[in-house]
C-alpha cells in the first residue's frame, strides 16, 4: 500500500512551537549522542546541559532573537520531526567576524532520516545565512560524527579548526568547519 501522507513541510518556528521543539531537540540529542554514539556523559553534566540547552526558556529566546532563525520540519500529522537553527557565528576561531554566520544545529528524528528532509532543512538554513551574513559560514560538528562531516563537506565546508564543546563540565572534541 502506498504512503499517502502529505509531504513534511519546512516552516519557520513560532512561539507556539516552543514546547514541541524543546522536546524534539532533547529527543534528537539523546538519539544521536546517547544512543547512536553512546557518549558516556557523566549524569550530572548531562542533566545540566539538557536543562540549559533544551529547556523551554532557551528555545523561546532562540526563536525570538531577531538575528537568529529556526525552522521546523512538520510531518503531515503536525508532529515536528526535524529542525535547523542558525544565526551569528559564536565559534572560537580568529577568522570569525560580525559578518560571519553559523549553522548551530540541524537534526532529524531517527525515524525521519533518509527522506531528503535534512537536505531541505540545510538548504533553507544556508540560504538564510547567505542572505543575512555576507562573510564565511561556519558550523561546529562533533569530531566523531563522520556522516555529518561528510554531508557538510559535500556542501563546501572545510575543516578550519577544533574546539571543545561543553556538555556540563564534560568536553566534547569538535571540528570547526567553514564555507567561503
Image (cartoon, helix red, strand yellow):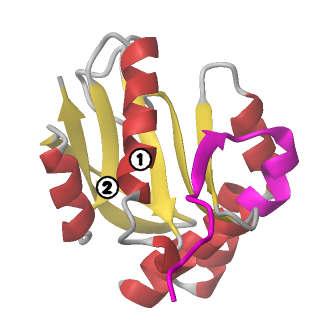
Q: Position of residue 17 (x, y in %)?
A: 80, 50
Q: Position of residue 121 (x, y in %)?
A: 45, 46
Q: Is residue 76 magenta?
A: no
Q: Position of residue 135 (x, y in %)?
A: 29, 13
Q: Which mark is residue 120?
A: 1
Of badges 2 and 1, nearer the viewer stands: 1
Q: Position of residue 140 (x, y in %)?
A: 33, 48
In this view, the residue in front, 108 or 33, is 108
Q: Which mark is residue 169?
A: none
Q: Which residues are magenta?
A: 1-21
Residue at image location 44% in from the left, 78% down from the top: 33
Q: Which mark is residue 141?
A: 2
Q: Is residue 84 left or right of residue 81?
A: left
Is any atom of residue 31 visible in this view? yes
Residue at image location 17% in from the left, 22% down from the top: 180
Mark 1 crowd level (few <14, some 14–19, many ≥20, 10 Å Cα): few
42 to 163, vertically: above or below: below
Q: Earlier in the sequence, mark 2 or mark 1?
A: 1
Amino acid at each position: 500500500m502506498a504512503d499517502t501522507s502529505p509531504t513534511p513541510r519546512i516552516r519557520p518556528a513560532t512561539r507556539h512551537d516552543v514546547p514541541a521543539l524543546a522536546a524534539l531537540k532533547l529527543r534528537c540529542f539523546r538519539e544521536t549522542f546517547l544512543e547512536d554514539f553512546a557518549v558516556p556523559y557523566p549524569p550530572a553534566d548531562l542533566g545540566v546541559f539538557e536543562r540549559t540547552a533544551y529547556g523551554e526558556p532557551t528555545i523561546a529566546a532562540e526563536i525570538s532573537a531577531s538575528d537568529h532563525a529556526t525552522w521546523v520540519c512538520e510531518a503531515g500529522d503536525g508532529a515536528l520531526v526535524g529542525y535547523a537553527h542558525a544565526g551569528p557565528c559564536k565559534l572560537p576561531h580568529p577568522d570569525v567576524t560580525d559578518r560571519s554566520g553559523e549553522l548551530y544545529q540541524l537534526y532529524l528524528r531517527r525515524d525521519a532520516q533518509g527522506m531528503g528532509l535534512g537536505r531541505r532543512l540545510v538548504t533553507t538554513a544556508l540560504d538564510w545565512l547567505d542572505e543575512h551574513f555576507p562573510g564565511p559560514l561556519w558550523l561546529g560538528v562533533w569530531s566523531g560524527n563522520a556522516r555529518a562531516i561528510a554531508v557538510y563537506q559535500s556542501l563546501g565546508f572545510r575543516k578550519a579548526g577544533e574546539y571543545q564543546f561543553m556538555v556540563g563540565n564534560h568536553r566534547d572534541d569538535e571540528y570547526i568547519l567553514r564555507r567561503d
